[in-house]
Amino acid sequence: KKKIAIMTSGGDSPGMNGVVRACVRMAIHMGCDAYCIYEGYEGLVRGGDLIRKMEWYDVRGWLSEGGTLIGTARCMAFFERAGRIAAAKNMILHGIDALIICGGDGSLTGADRFRAEWPSLLDELAANGEFTTQELQPFRHLNIVGLVGSIDNDLSGTDATIGCYSALARICYAVDLIEATASSHSRAFVVEVMGRHCGWLALMAGVATGADFIFIPEKPREDNWREEMCGIVEHHRKIGKRKTIVIIAEGALDREGNKITPTMVKDLLADKDGLGLDTRITTLGHVQRGGTAVAYDRMLATLQGVEAVKAVLEATPDTKTCVIAINENKIVRKPLMEAVQDTKKVAKAIERQDFNEAMNLRDAEFSE
Ligand code: F6P
């Protein structure tokens, strides 16, 4: 019987439990044994009871649970070769030669590296006398498939990452709540949202809530952003708006690459010689990441989990490590490292303040 393991890694995202449920059940449905690796790569390195065989009913009710019930961790040991040797040994001890990993680009890069190194890890295990060459024979080819779990929607090559629509829904809900009190007091609110190097959450939340102004990392405002923002807010106030909402991505920058902070924006809106608005800051933080998944993320998690198991079963030794994506409403397989490299290109363009390039890359992603 083929043994397929599933793990979640990096920052959690709503929908990860749906992924685990779908993979476990599809694996069993296809006549395989399903395993869960608890605590992400940490579980792979430490082994023991962190690697558990799962049955159909073990994942009952998981679709509607938030976070990841099998845990996740940022594991330093896996960055060291000794950690990866221990991980390979644990997999072989459990008879596992196929791994489905749901995480962000960092976790998926780690997975690809593990697969590339796999033959040399086996050689080292044989040389250390841990296993005989014969014992290692069935494990010659490690099969890895990635699923993108992230609230940021920051992976190139897929229209949506698992969790991004849940986070967006939560942001909209929070902004709706804030708007009520903002309106009562005729106040301004600066709402900081997550998204690391990616402004998708801030941009779409701005569209979905009708915010007055937004800041995202990929497209810093012109140097006159202060005047521009105040001008727009002033105009909105003049036409009778009692509330002001400015959404700022946590990675927002100005043209020189300096961080634009919520405090800077608040001070500007509150400036007595300017708009003089009674202004508050709300940092939404991890509220965006926790809680149950919206229907779209449950659907995506399920369809992609099923596809991941199919990809594992159809893989040959020559198949490149793939990531399961969604493009124009179709679930597709894509080469993992190309998606990761394209993602890194955007972050690097932002780092070197080549914002035209960052925007071109993002545009290309969405018109793909
Ligand atoms: O990548 C997901 C994310 O939530 C980012 O939006 C955010 O910058 C980061 O993780 C926060 O990480 P942590 O939970 O480790 O503080």
Image: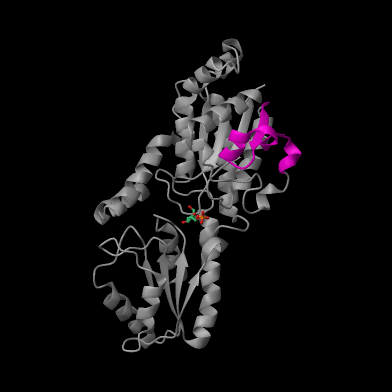
Q: Residue 331 lies in magenta, yes or no?
A: no
Q: Residue 283: where, in percent of width, then height? A: 49, 69
Whether residue 332 is visible, yes or no, is no
Q: Residue 32 lies in magenta, yes or no?
A: yes
Image-based side of 61 in relation to 223, left or right = right
Q: Residue furthest right?
A: 57
Image-based side of 197 in relation to 325, left or right = left
The residue range painted magenta reads 31-59
In this view, the residue in front, 109 or 356, is 109
Q: Is residue 283 above or below residue 106?
A: below
What residue is drawn where x is 41% and y is 67%? 248
Whether residue 124 is visible, yes or no, is yes
What residue is drawn where x is 56% and y is 38%? 41
Q: Quadrant of the C terminus?
A: top left
Counting labels gives 0
Give the quarter of the image for residue 49: top right
Q: Residue 250: where, in percent of width, then height? A: 42, 62
Q: Is residue 295 above or below residue 18?
A: below
What residue is drawn where x is 67% and y is 32%? 34
Q: Residue 271: where, in percent of width, then height? A: 35, 85
Q: Is residue 358 above or below residue 220?
A: above
Q: Residue 102: where, in percent of width, then height? A: 54, 41
What residue is drawn where x is 53% and y is 27%? 143
